[in-house]
Amino acid sequence: MKPEQDHMFQYLTEIVKKGFPEPTFMNAISPGECLSVAAYSNSISQESLALLKSEDKTNVGFFFDGPIYPIRNGACYTLTNLMRALGESGSVNPILINCYRGWDDFTEYYDKKFGSVFMTPKDFYEPTDMLTSVVVKSNMEMAQFYDTELLVNIGPRLKNMGVKLILEVQNINHVLLERLGAPQPDIARALEFERVAFRLADYVLCRSDVDMGLALEQGSDPARSAVYRGGIFVNDFEFQLRGTGSKLLFLGHMYYQPNENALRVMAEHILPNLDDSYTLTVIGITPPGVIEKYSSDRILFRGGVDDLSGELLDYDIALAPLLEGSGTRLKVLDYLASGIPVIATSIAVEGLDPNIIQHLFVENDIEQYPMIIQRVGKSTVDDKCAIEARRYTAANYDWPVCIAPFLNTYDTLKGSK
């Protein structure tokens, strides 16, 4: 597979270059065909598209490129939990439209509260008859996008079919590229796709007020734009009060450059200034080269885990010393839901409710981290603070609370011509 010769997909291109394992299900689908799994189903076929539609619910297609299960990054984490919450709401029929690149085992999609359709990159990125067939047979009323380039490519054809277009903004791509020091042509290209997509979309949903301001600057219509909070399922996390301890945790996949940069900061500027009793564990898929570079008696790599809630209970202090990024960092919410004291930069909490800073330590001077870690690690954490942090997360970021902007958007678009 040569992603650079395929339809452009930044994340896939990046992870392949960093040594992501080769896909194992490459020949499962051919161009011009698709496979589908209906919600709550235990089978996959080419004939079950009609089972995906619902006559009494709003049928919304969620277009996403790349592997999803097992959950590998924050975008997948957000999307699957959103579709789960919408499915549980009883008013929406979520359908994942996936650009299949050979990594996923279809059986991972069985028994989900959303339907799934898999197609090849050619049929996903181009306005082909295959795309038309999927829209018609599933009775898709709305299409929700996470990639501006994809929306620009196929959005016009969908609009001609009467499908409403929604752009969900998890990241402002040109801002992320600027923070990572990307070449100017790449930044300009991302900015141009954003400007076109913001105007083409029937509605724009932004993860934060910061992102909303940037979207409005690029031409998004205030009358058809709204902010939503990316959430977690708080009850999925077992809560545990922490005592003293020296086991540090960083949650994040290392194929994402801002996370790898944060790891470098922890390895070079934080751990060396702590005594040898302190260890750092990284939970998240990690390139072999990164493991080889940083692995030691004090830096441990757990890889991806199936039971994140259980894993979080083993650690004493969570870190989020991020220096780049855009959107919001859900790892901070995972930490708070579990009861771990958190030390983070302002970038790590950017886009979250400003009141979140009452429930964690915010510090941008990396040189101060060792001192704060030692103070937290050698003193019993205030039980009341940890309990309040959990309550705050449940009240503000539990998915059943967070889906209201989506439901309002669907109702608005369903009632418009």
Image: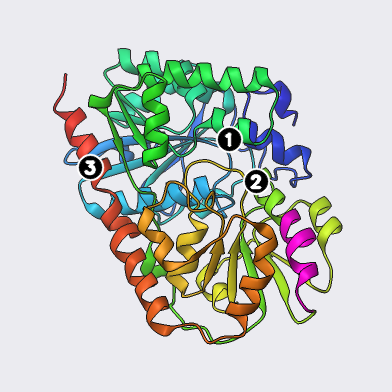
Magenta residue check for 272: yes
- Looking at the rendered structure, the kind of residue marked 1 is Leu
Graded by Cα atoms within 10 Å as few (under 14), some (14 to 19) or many (20 or more), the crowding at tag 2 reads many
Work out how far the residue at label 2 is from the one at label 3, CA to CA, in angstroms.
Answer: 32 Å
Ranked by sequence position, the earlier of labels 2 and 1 is 1
| Residue 291, image quadrant | bottom right
State the mark number for residue 407: 3
- In the picture, measured across the screen, residue 269 lies left or right of residue 85, that is right
Mark 1: few/some/many CA within 10 Å (<14, 14-19, 20+) = some
Point 38% across, 71% down: residue: 390
Residue 130 seen in this snapshot: no
Front residue (pair 76, 292): 292
For this rendering, which residue is in front, 33 or 370?
370
Pointer 2 with pointer 3, Cβ within 8 A: no
In the rendered structure, the answer to whether residue 334 lies left or right of residue 302 reads left
The residue depicted at 36 percent of the width and 64 percent of the height is: 393
The quadrant holding residue 3 is top right
Name of the residue lying farthest toward the left = 415
Eye-nearest disc, 2 or 3? 2
Q: CA distance from mark 3 to mark 1?
A: 28 Å
Q: Over which residues does the magenta segment extend?
A: 264-275
- Where residue 346 appears, as percent x and y from the top left, is 52, 52
Q: Quick one: 273 or 224, which is closer to the camera? A: 273
**Residue 301: horizontal and vertical position, in percent?**
73, 65
Going from N to C along the chain, the mark reached first, 3 or 1, is 1
Asked if disc 3 and disc 1 are in contact, CB closer than 8 Å, the reply is no
Residue 314 pos. (x, y %): 59, 79
SS at mark 3 in the image: helix
Residue that badge 2 annotates: 258
